[in-house]
Amino acid sequence: MVTPIIILFMLTSPLIIAFLYSKFSDRPLNITKYACWGLGIAFIFFFVGHLVETEGMVEMLPSWVPSRLALVYLTGLIELLIGIALFMPRYQPLAAKLAIVVFVIFFPANIYAALNGIGLGGHQWGPVYLLIRGPLQIILIAWAYFLCLKGHNTYEPPVGQ
């Protein structure tokens, strides 16, 4: 059950490092930029998971889904493109919106895997895993919406401290 912790670490690390730098250098912090970077790192991690755990990802889909292997590679490619776009200021709003859509659309595969005890990333715990995965999805969606899309996310450190 280490994967959710890794995801949260990758998600928050760029923002935490930038915040600390901002605090000690008295420079403003562009929260949106670093929040998008964290989400981008997470999406690239998701993409790598599609390559490393391809068979496990295929098992997460019901057998009636056509071309499951091709679908796993396609969704991995989508995650890679979203991840890269989250590093490019011009594409960050679109990428954050697509990230939210991906989180919502892909969640049924997590439900299916948990209900069927598929042994990948905690799903072998069964429905209990959804008590972790569900809140994680909500955190990821909230992160994408509130920190990457709102657009007015700047922190100014107090002057003269």
Image (cartoon, rainbow, N blue to C red):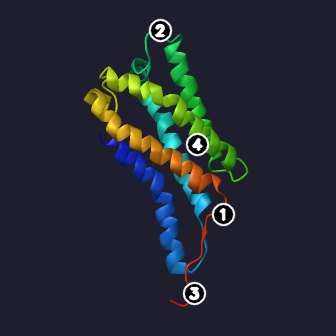
Residue 124 lies in what quarter of the image? top left
Mark toward the start of the polypeptide (2 vs 4): 2
Depth order, front residue of 110/1: 110
Residue 64's label in the rendered image is 2
Mark toward the start of the polypeptide (4 vs 3): 4
Q: Check disc 3 and report the residue beneath it.
A: 159
**Residues marked 3 and 2 touching at CB (< 8 Å):** no
Neighbours of disc 4 within 10 Å: few (<14), some (14-19), many (20+) = many
Mark toward the start of the polypeptide (1 vs 4): 4
Residue drawn at x 52%, y 41% is 44
Judged from the image, the secondary structure of the residue bearing numbered disc 4 is: helix
Q: Check disc 1 and report the residue beneath it.
A: 152
Mark toward the start of the polypeptide (1 vs 2): 2
Whole-percent x, y for residue 142 in the image: 52, 49
- Against 59, is 150 above or below? below
Tell me the distance, in whole angstroms, between the alpha carbons under discs 1 and 3: 20 Å
Neighbours of disc 1 within 10 Å: few (<14), some (14-19), many (20+) = few
Tell me the distance, in whole angstroms, between the alpha carbons under discs 1 and 4: 21 Å
Tell me the distance, in whole angstroms, between the alpha carbons under discs 1 and 2: 45 Å
Identify residue type, mark 2: Trp
Whole-percent x, y for residue 3 in the image: 35, 41
Depth order, front residue of 111/25: 111
Residue 82 lies in what quarter of the image? top right
Q: Check disc 4 and report the residue beneath it.
A: 83
- Against 129, is 55 above or below? above
Is residue 104 found left or right of 92 in the rendered image? left
